[in-house]
Image (cartoon, rainbow, N blue to C red):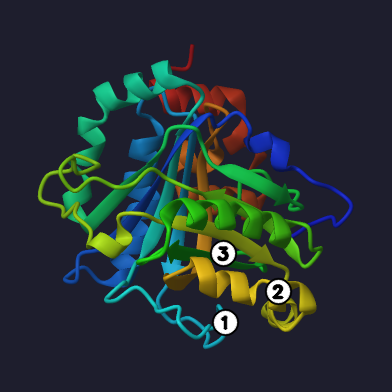
Amino acid sequence: MTHDHRHDADYASRDAAIAINTYTTVLKRPQVPHEVFATYWRDVHGPLCSRVPGLGWYVQYHLDREQDAHLWPAQAGIEPFPDYVLDGGVEIGFADAADQATFNEASSILFSDEQNMFAATIAYALPHGSRTLVDRIVDPSPNGNDAFDRMHIHFGPGGKDPDAFAAFMTAFAETLAADPALLRVRLHLPEVYDNGDPAPPAPDVAHTVPPERERLAILDLTFATPLVRRRFFASDVFSDTVEAQKQHIGHVTAFAVSGMYTYVRDKTLTLAGLRGSRPAQLIERLGAVNQADEAVRHLMLTGRLD
């Protein structure tokens, strides 16, 4: 995939078609080796999900448990979420409510597959979508571990005012997006998660959260490199937000993104969605243009040449 970015460009508007979204946290089954889990999720589960009707947007974010020590600056009075370990995050989005209803009606074939690799999945609802505040990265559909420094930071209000927390997170995201050090800023402010109505409805997979994780805000941030990130955290722009962070945030845990894989964009299968993430990488690496031909696409989708 391309590593290009342009500081004088902003592609954020291309995400506006995702009117309704969900952000799902995933934890793998402990008995499944990580490489088996990651391969199955990318190349077996991913293409299956991609083909469920109604889907307009589908991205897997694989998270790295071996994070560097400075992924997010610790602040006095803001505690990590206790016992919070993740292996991934997922965005599943829709152009409208009718498409979401179509997906939900057909989704049992997808959710029955989750038990093969996931110990827990929590789908946080974003009925009004998420917000991309800035995106300077040229590639609209990443499929791989690229040269960028990507991370997801999960925040919670703890015992602090939840409405003030949400308002602060919006203003905080806007402050970050205004700085050229940030190549991408995407904010998720989901509805409060209800353990009484667990989602997604996948059998033999846990779908409950402790009270401190019922309300989350997620910042999806991208820097060019870890050095750029560290310099930004030492800057006056970030330092000037610290007291407000302490006032409004109760919990924060940061996760490094090891790979971002896009399977559906604008209701259209990407090459990863059609063929699987790793096969798509092989096709791109070898320049196998015939594999991206419309006749091949039609054959893979329908089993027919006509």
Q: Looking at this view, is 283 or 12 the one in front?
A: 12
Q: Nearer the viewer, mark 3 or mark 2?
A: 2
Residue 1 in view: no
Mark 1 or mark 2, which has the lower sequence index?
1
For image coordinates 41% across by 50% down, the residue present is 90
For residue 70, which quarter of the picture?
bottom right
Residue sticking out furthest to the top: 306
* Pointer 1 local density, CA inside 10 Å: few below 14, some 14–19, many at least 20: few
Are the residues tagged 1 and 2 within 8 Å (C-beta)? yes
Coordinates of residue 204 in the picture (x, y in percent): 10, 50
Coordinates of residue 33 in the picture (x, y in percent): 25, 72
Q: CA gap, disc 3 to disc 1?
A: 24 Å
Q: What amino acid type is highlighted by mark number 2?
A: Phe
Specify whether 114 is left or right of 163.
left
Q: CA gap, disc 1 to disc 2?
A: 10 Å
Residue 182 in view: yes
Q: What amino acid type is highlighted by mark number 3?
A: Asn
Are the residues tagged 3 and 2 within 8 Å (C-beta)? no
Q: Secondary structure at mark 3?
A: loop
Q: Which residue is mark 3?
A: 145
Q: Which residue is mark 1?
A: 73
Mark 3 or mark 1, which has the lower sequence index?
1
Q: CA gap, disc 3 to disc 2?
A: 27 Å
Coordinates of residue 150 in the picture (x, y in percent): 59, 66
Q: Looking at this view, is 116 or 206 the one in front?
A: 206
For image coordinates 60% across by 69% down, the residue present is 244
Q: Secondary structure at mark 2?
A: helix
Disc ID at residue 238: 2
Q: Looking at this view, is 277 or 146 the one in front?
A: 146
